[in-house]
Amino acid sequence: MFVRRTNTRGQSGEAYFTHRLVETVRVGKAVTQRTILNLGAKFDLPQADWPVLAARIDEVVHGQASL
């Protein structure tokens, strides 16, 4: 899992960024990415901490304890 910053446009045409928690999965022979959670446009966590957040969410989802 990882956090992706995506450029999006609103209904008025105004551009803004939104953040999504994304996972990579294999479907047959193809590898695809799917959005697990939309974190929104006001996601204030520093980018250096995104991998730690994604790893912790992955642990919680899969029932693993943190060390």
Image (spheres, rainbow, N blue to C red):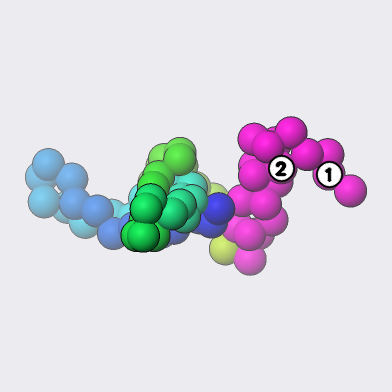
Disc 2 crowd, CA 10 A, few/some/many (<14, 14-19, 20+): few
Element assignment for label 2: helix
In the rendered structure, which amino acid carries the disc numbered 2?
A: Glu
57 in the magenta segment: yes
User: Do we see residue 33 in this rendering?
Assistant: no
- Image check: 9 left or right of 3? left
40 relative to 14, above or below: above
The residue pinned by badge 1 equals: 66
**Which residue corresponds to the image point at 18% horizontal and 45% vertical from the top-left?**
10
In the rendered structure, which amino acid carries the disc numbered 1?
A: Ser
Element assignment for label 1: loop
**Which residue corresponds to the image point at 10% horizontal and 45% vertical from the top-left?**
12
Q: Which residues are magenta?
A: 48-67
- Image check: 3 left or right of 35? right
Identity of the residue furthest to the left in this view: 12
**Which residue corresponds to the image point at 83% horizontal and 44% vertical from the top-left?**
66
Res. 59 mark:
2
